[in-house]
Image (spheres, rainbow, N blue to C red):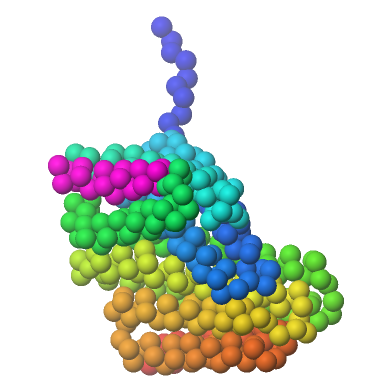
C-alpha cells in the first residue's frame, strides 16, 4: 500500500543560540521592567528608588534562574522549550500586572506569579537533574520547591511577614546556588557560553531600550527646542553605553566565561552572571529615569534622587563592567586606565546636576560618556598597533 507523505520533522534546537521562544518570553519581561521603572520617571525619592531596586532584584533573579535552567537543557526539544517558556511567560505576566502596586494592593499577585515561576523552574531542574541521586533531588526540592512554597504562603501573609518571606526565599536560592554551583556544573557538563552571551546581550538591549523609550515618551509629551535638544543628548548617552556594551562587553563576557570554565571557577561564573550584572542593568534603569525627568523640565535642577541616579547610574554601569572583567582575569593595569575616569567623571557630573539645569547635566554626562568611548577606542588602537 502506498503511504502518504510524512510530516516534516522539526529541526532540533540549536542549544548554542537563544531560541525564538526565549526572545518571545523577553517581551513580557520588557513590559515588567517598564512597569517597575515607571515610578522613576515622576520625581522619585530615594525611598522609591530603594523599592524599585528591591523589586527589580527579585525579578532579575527569576530571569537569571530561568536562563541558567534553559542553558543546561541542551537536549530540550523546541516544542518542550516552547511549553516551558509559555508557562513562564504567564507567570511573569502576572508579576508584570502586579508590579505598580507590588508592595501594596497587588502584593498577593506578585507573590503568586513568583510562586508559579518557581514551579516552572522546578520542572526544568527536575527534568535535567532528578536522576542525579538523593542529594540532587534534595537540592531541586529545596531550591525551587521550598522557595516556591514560601512565595505561595506570602500571598496570604500580612505585609511585614510577606516581605520577610520574599527575602528569605531569595536568600535561600542565592545561598544554595553559591554552595552547590561547583558540583552542579561539573555534573551537568558546564555551561553553554554562546547561549549565555546572547541572552545577556538581549538583556542589555532591553535595559538600553528603556532609555530610548523614556526619551521618546518624554519628548512627545513636552516638545520644545530645549527638550528636543535634551532628548538628542539622551539618545547620544544611550548610544555611548551601547557602544561600550556591544563592541566591548559581550565579547569580553564570552572570552571571560571561557576563561572561568577552563579554570573550573564556578563561583566566578555565578558572580559574573548572576549577581554583578544586576548592578549594571540597575544603573541603566536609574539613568533612564533621570533622562526622562530632564527632558520633561530641562530648565529645572534635578531632584537629589535623580541627580544621584544620573551620576550613580553611569558610574555603576562602568564600575560593574570593571569588576566583571577583572574577575574574568584581566590585570588591574589594563582595567584602571579606563575604569577610573569612567567612574569618577559620571560621579562628578552627578554632583554638578544638583546645581545646574537638567539639560546642562545631561549634556555634561553625554560629553563624559563620549570621552570615555574615545579613550577606550584609542587604547584599543594602541594595543593593536603594539601587537
Residue drawn at (67%, 92%) of the image: 355
User: Can residue 280 be seen?
Assistant: yes
Residue 105 higher or lower than 39, as above or below: above
User: Which of the 4 image quarters holds residue 258?
Assistant: bottom left
Count of marks overlaid on the render: 0
Where in the figure is residue 97, as x and y percent of width and height? 59, 48
- The front one of 43 and 93 is 43
Residue 109 higher or lower than 101, as above or below: above
- Say whether residue 189 is left or right of residue 241: left
Q: Quadrant of the N terminus?
A: top left
Q: Is residue 148 magenta?
A: yes
Residue drawn at (55%, 71%) of the image: 47
Main secondary structure of the magenta stretch: helix
Q: Is residue 110 magenta?
A: no
Where in the figure is residue 375, as x and y percent of width and height? 51, 91
Residue drawn at (62%, 86%) of the image: 365
Residue drawn at (31%, 64%) of the image: 270
Q: Residue furthest top?
A: 1
- The front one of 176 and 136 is 176
Where in the figure is residue 95, as x and y percent of width and height? 53, 49
Numbered range of the magenta stretch: 132-153
User: Which of the 4 image quarters holds residue 362?
Assistant: bottom right
User: Can residue 28 be seen?
Assistant: no
- The front one of 3 and 228 is 228
- Say whether residue 308 is left or right of residue 272: right
Where in the figure is residue 109, as x and y percent of width and height? 52, 45
Q: Quadrant of the C terminus?
A: bottom left
User: Which of the 4 image quarters holds residue 384?
Assistant: bottom left
Amino acid at each position: 500500500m502506498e503511504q502518504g507523505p510524512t510530516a516534516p520533522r522539526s529541526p532540533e534546537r540549536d542549544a548554542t543560540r537563544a531560541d525564538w521562544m526565549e526572545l518571545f518570553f523577553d517581551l513580557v519581561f520588557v513590559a515588567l521592567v517598564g512597569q517597575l521603572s515607571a515610578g522613576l520617571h515622576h520625581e522619585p525619592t530615594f525611598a522609591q528608588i530603594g523599592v524599585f531596586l528591591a523589586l527589580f532584584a527579585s525579578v532579575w533573579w527569576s530571569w537569571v534562574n530561568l536562563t541558567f535552567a534553559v542553558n543546561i537543557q541542551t537536549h530540550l526539544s523546541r516544542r518542550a522549550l516552547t511549553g516551558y517558556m509559555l508557562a513562564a511567560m504567564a507567570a511573569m505576566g502576572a508579576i508584570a500586572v502586579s508590579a505598580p502596586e507590588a508592595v501594596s494592593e497587588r502584593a498577593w499577585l506578585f507573590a503568586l506569579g513568583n510562586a508559579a515561576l518557581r514551579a516552572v523552574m522546578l520542572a526544568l531542574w527536575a527534568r535535567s537533574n532528578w536522576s542525579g541521586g538523593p542529594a540532587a533531588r534534595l537540592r531541586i526540592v529545596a531550591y525551587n520547591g521550598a522557595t516556591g512554597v514560601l512565595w505561595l504562603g506570602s500571598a496570604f501573609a500580612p505585609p511585614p511577614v510577606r516581605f520577610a518571606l520574599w527575602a528569605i526565599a531569595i536568600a535561600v536560592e542565592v545561598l544554595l546556588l553559591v554552595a552547590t554551583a561547583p558540583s552542579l556544573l561539573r555534573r551537568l557538563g558546564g555551561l553553554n557560553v554562546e547561549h549565555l552571551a546572547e541572552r545577556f546581550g538581549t538583556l542589555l538591549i532591553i535595559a538600553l531600550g528603556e532609555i530610548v523609550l523614556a526619551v521618546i515618551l518624554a519628548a512627545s509629551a513636552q516638545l520644545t527646542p530645549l527638550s528636543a535638544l535634551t532628548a538628542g543628548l539622551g539618545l547620544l548617552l544611550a548610544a555611548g553605553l551601547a557602544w561600550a556594551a556591544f563592541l566591548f562587553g559581550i565579547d569580553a563576557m564570552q572570552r571571560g566565561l571561557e576563561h572561568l570554565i577552563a579554570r573550573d571557577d564556578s563561583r566566578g561564573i555565578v558572580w559574573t552572571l548572576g549577581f554583578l550584572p544586576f548592578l549594571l542593568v540597575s544603573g541603566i534603569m536609574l539613568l533612564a529615569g533621570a533622562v526622562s525627568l530632564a527632558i520633561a523640565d530641562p530648565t529645572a535642577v534635578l531632584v537629589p534622587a535623580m541627580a544621584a541616579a544620573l551620576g550613580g547610574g553611569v558610574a555603576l554601569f562602568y564600575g560593574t563592567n570593571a569588576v566583571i572583567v577583572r574577575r574574568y582575569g584581566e590585570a588591574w593595569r589594563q582595567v584602571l586606565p579606563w575604569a577610573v575616569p569612567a567612574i569618577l567623571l559620571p560621579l562628578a557630573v552627578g554632583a554638578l546636576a544638583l546645581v545646574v539645569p537638567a539639560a546642562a547635566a545631561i549634556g555634561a554626562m553625554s560629553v563624559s560618556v563620549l570621552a570615555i568611548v574615545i579613550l577606550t577606542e584609542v587604547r584599543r588602537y594602541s594595543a593593536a598597533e603594539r601587537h
